[in-house]
Amino acid sequence: MAEQEMTGQEAEQADLVKATTDTMSDDAGLAEEETKIADGDALVPVSSDPLAADQTEVLIGDAESSEDDRTRTMATYGKLDMKVGLSFKKLDFIVTDKTQVDGQKLILDNISGYVEPGKVLCILGPSGSGKTTLLQVLSGTLSHSNANNGEIFFHGNKKSEKKLSGDIMGFRGNAAYVPQEDMLTGSLTVRETLMSAAMLKKPKNEGSFSASDLDMVENTINELGLKTCRDVLIGNIFFKGCSGGQKRRVSIGVELMSQPNLLFLDEPTSGLDSTSSFKVMSIVSALAKKGHTVVLTIHQPSSRIFNMMCDNDMSMLVLEGGRTMYFGRCSEVADYMKEAGHAVPQFSNPCDHVLDVVNTDFEKSDKRANKLAERFSEKLLPGIYDRIDELNLAQRSEKLKTKQIQGVCGQVLILLRRNFLNHLREPTIYWMRIVMYSMLCIALGTLYWEIGVDDSSVQDRISILFFVAAFLTFMAISGMPAFVAERGIYLRERTNNHYSTLAYSIANFLSSLPWIFLISLLSSSFIYGMIQSRLGGEVFVVYLLNLFVALLVAESMMVAISATSRFFMVGLAIGAGMLGLYMIVCGFFLQPTNIPAAWKWVHYGVSFHTYSFRVFMINEFLDLPLDPNNTQWTSGNAVLKHYEMEENNIGFCFVVLFIMMFVYRVAFYGLLRFIEKRG
């Protein structure tokens, strides 16, 4: 609880001030660090922790630390080995819009610009001006195949749209994208979140996670001002955790684990107070000094932020209606606007003034914006083309390596560990379902306590078997909100090449097995023991296995549906509709011979309830002696004959259930690949 209390505004601001002071060192301080690196001194933070002291010895000693680990650690404290630039020419982006005369809408119109290696480019503009679209096109998270023309150059070479399986963004692992929404696992702590990212991003050829990697995580926590909340949960609707500013910095820290040369940030200051916004931008400036090239969108920077942008030689691109109003250094925008006849008033924020001038939402005409766009094309655009050519020519000779990540097996193990922690702490994924299943099964047990074998009891037996096969699997939809929430986290991490889709799919399946089995074991034990169903250990094993496999099929179907929808209410509706249809045709309400021919394919080929209910019935009634005084049922075999289940094919039913589960899991994998390709 004490740790949670330290995540308040005062603790956050105090830690931010310290982090900014540490990271925004002057050129003399950086030069001193470089001298230490050149002399071979290990830069290790002082700590009284015995574990940290042990790690310090490992890092300092040449015998204990490999050269690769040493280089990796130094990159954390010093500058990147190589700086890269990004440039773009004549970018257009068109979307379908039926309200337009030609059915198309131009979102970006002939956008050109560049960001020099180790510098920051800030994209500004009113709401709806195309800022985020441009950032996504540049980062590769939104395909620019919709463009009629346009080129993007990375490190001097034209960026290709041919995206490999492990490189969605197309920068060979040398770039990272941080979206505006903080997609983080709320049940993990800040340190656990960064540790998982560091493990996933560590190349498989560099061995296991070492002391230097742990030191990189700890130093990143300190640099981002997260020391006071390092062991605090990220937080969600169930857990009180980090503040908005802390979450934003954690999102940045996650992507810094790969030490990307190019960093894209979508409105990193959105939703933050002025002080937190300033500190986040200070961190961005510090990253640029280390060699990270940063491209970001920012809605309306304060005067303090604008002054910092000028002091740190940041560039600015101003958009309005998808057109460029200004491109150049932030420090030169006031003079440019004065020459254009829109001088910045005294004591005014130049950014506020520029956005007021270019915004056409509340103007009767867009005459001012048109004049600024024409002036940009005449005065600045030719020089931009020349500078792009110069930058590309200067960088083309330098070879940039492709960054590797963990292999599939390593990714699966890391994701399993993270999923285990998430499932253990997050109540909505499995704990709530365990309680719900247990209470319902206890209610069923007391309702059908020690059921008999007379005429009325036989029908009761059949009813409860159908209920178990149908409604216990139906409750798998309760996990849909958690599945949909995890979808957003997957898309962010997959976009940044944290792991492969195959590794994620395998880990998702394996991590669910123990929880589904626990639910099946508790449910089977309560129902089987209290109702005094057919006795025998072998019968119970089949009962348990059938419920376990049926729940796995239902779970697999739910995760496949969750991959198609961003909104859990849509997923709930689709899942409930499909399960309801499967129940109707499973053979309980309507015998198979009475099912219309047009619906038989659902009964035999799609509804897993058909086979699960069949296994329950055969397991319960095959050769079961009934009350001799029964008038309707003479034996258990007569019951099976009535329901057209006289053939003992339990093995075949299990095979079909496993096939269905496999098909849903393959569909889950395929749908994930489809949505990631769409960007």
Image (cartoon, grey):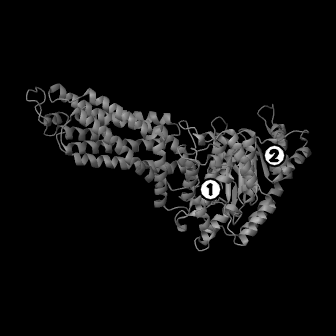
Q: Closest to the observer: 201 or 400? A: 201
Residue 198 in the figure: left or right of residue 523: right
Residue 86's spot in the image, x, y percent? 71, 58
Q: Earlier along the polypeptide chain: callout 1 or callout 2? A: 1
Q: Residue at x 69, y 39 (%)?
A: 9
Please tell me which residue lies in front, 117 or 375: 117
The amino acid pointed to by label 2 is Phe
Mark 2: give few (<14), some (14-19) or many (20+) Cα within 10 Å: many
Q: Position of residue 118 (x, y in %)?
A: 74, 59
Residue that label 2 marks: 306
Q: Quick check: 513 left or right of 275?
A: left
Q: Which residue is mark 1?
A: 218
Q: Position of residue 419 (x, y in %)?
A: 47, 49
* C-alpha gap between disc 1 and disc 2: 31 Å
In the image, which disc is placed on residue 166? none
For disc 1, the neighbor class at 10 Å (few under 14, some 14 to 19, many from 20) is some
Indicate left or right for 141 with 472 as reference.
right
**Number of callouts in the render?**
2
Type of amino acid under label 1? Glu
Secondary structure beneath label 2: helix
Residue 568 can be seen in this image:
yes
Q: Say what secondary structure mark 1 lies in.
A: helix
Could you tell whether 364 is left or right of 263 in the image? Answer: right
Considering every residue shown, the one lying at the far left of the view is 628
Q: Quadrant of residue 624?
A: top left
